[in-house]
Every structure is written in structure tokens, then in C-alpha cells.
Image (tube, rainbow, N blue to C red):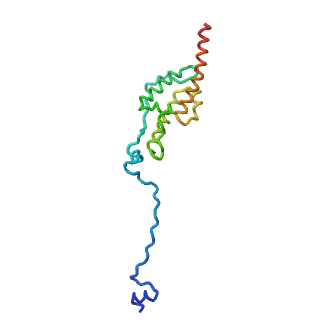
Amino acid sequence: MSGNPVASSIIGTPALNTPQPMPMPTPTPVLSQAPAAGSVQALDVSCPRIIVHSISTSDWPSTLILNLPANNWYKWDFQLNSMLALSGGMHKYPMGTKVTPDVIDEPCAERNWRKNDYAILQLTHHKVSQIECDLIMNFTSSQCAYEFLHDHHQKQGIFMQIILLQELFSI
């Protein structure tokens, strides 16, 4: 009886031909799924809405460094905005009109936006006096640095104009 597989299964010993239960596979967690075709994410990966631009400083006058005593805000501001406008519309970054893309929906565009903004911030650091550079050193966006410099020079600019008028009339 022990040699017969059918008899063995009846007595309680598993038969040789009896199917054994298969262990259930453990589901593997999906870490990242490919974006659905036609979604904003899919378009962002293949063709991000914002690209990385380069800024040409070859037309920047070597003597034009923003400096409060020089009272050259308007000339410096015009040069910066002209140069950035010719560099793919980057003048919108320091003005705050180029909105940061959502990192979830458009990760590539958001990364490119941050690179462009950082390039403008670094350009600003290089085109201001050391005193001005120290004032904006801790700003993390071109918009914050630009707004600070604008306000700083507008307030002081009026004062400097009064001093210049006083000097003019005292001669």
C-alpha cells in the first residue's frame, strides 16, 4: 500500500502527483511610473516648456558696475533688462513675471527655471559693486535681489539728486 500514490494520499501522506499550493508572489512596489502619454509630465520630459538659456555678457560695458555713489541705477537697469530680453526673454525672471512651474507637474521645466534664475542671480552679483554684492549675497532668487537693489537705489537715488542739485547751485 505504501508504494501506491493514491493509497498514500488517502492515509494522510501527500501523494507524489498531488498539486502543492503555490506561494503568492509579493507585489513589488512601483517607485515611479512613466507619465501617461499626452499628460503634462510626458510633454515636460520630452519637450519642457522652459529651456536653459545662456546669457551673453559681451555687450555689457566693462565700466558699468552698479554703485550707489555713482547714481547709475537707470543705466544699469536698462542694460540688465536689455541683455536678459535678448537672451530668450529672461528679463521676466527678476521682474517676477516668469512664474515657477510646478515641480510635480513639470519637473524638467522647474529645474530649468531654477538654473536660469540662478544664472541671472550670479550675473547680478558680478555686475554690482562689492558693497552691493554683500547686500544681496543671501538672496536666493534673482527677483528678490533685483527688488532689493531697485528699492535701495530708488530711495537713495532721490537723495543723491538733491545732493547733486545742491552742489550745482553752490558753484
- The quadrant of the picture occupied by the N terminus is bottom left
Whether residue 41 sits left or right of residue 94 in the image: it is left
Q: Which residue is pictured at 43% across the width and 34% down the height?
A: 54
- Position of residue 101 relative to residue 68, above or below, is below
- Position of residue 9 relative to residue 122, above or below, is below
Q: Which residue is pictured at 60% across the width and 8% down the height?
A: 169
> Residue 111: x, y in percent?
47, 42
> Residue 13: x, y in percent?
45, 86
- The quadrant of the picture occupied by the C terminus is top right
Q: Which residue is pictured at 44% across the width and 44% down the height?
A: 108
> Residue 152: x, y in percent?
58, 26
**Number of dots carrying numbers:** 0
- Position of residue 169 relative to residue 77, above or below, is above
Task: Looking at this view, name the residue that lies furthest to the bottom.
Answer: 1
Q: Which residue is pictured at 59% across the width and 12% down the height?
A: 165
Q: Nearer the viewer, residue 46 or 55?
A: 46
> Residue 83: x, y in percent?
44, 27
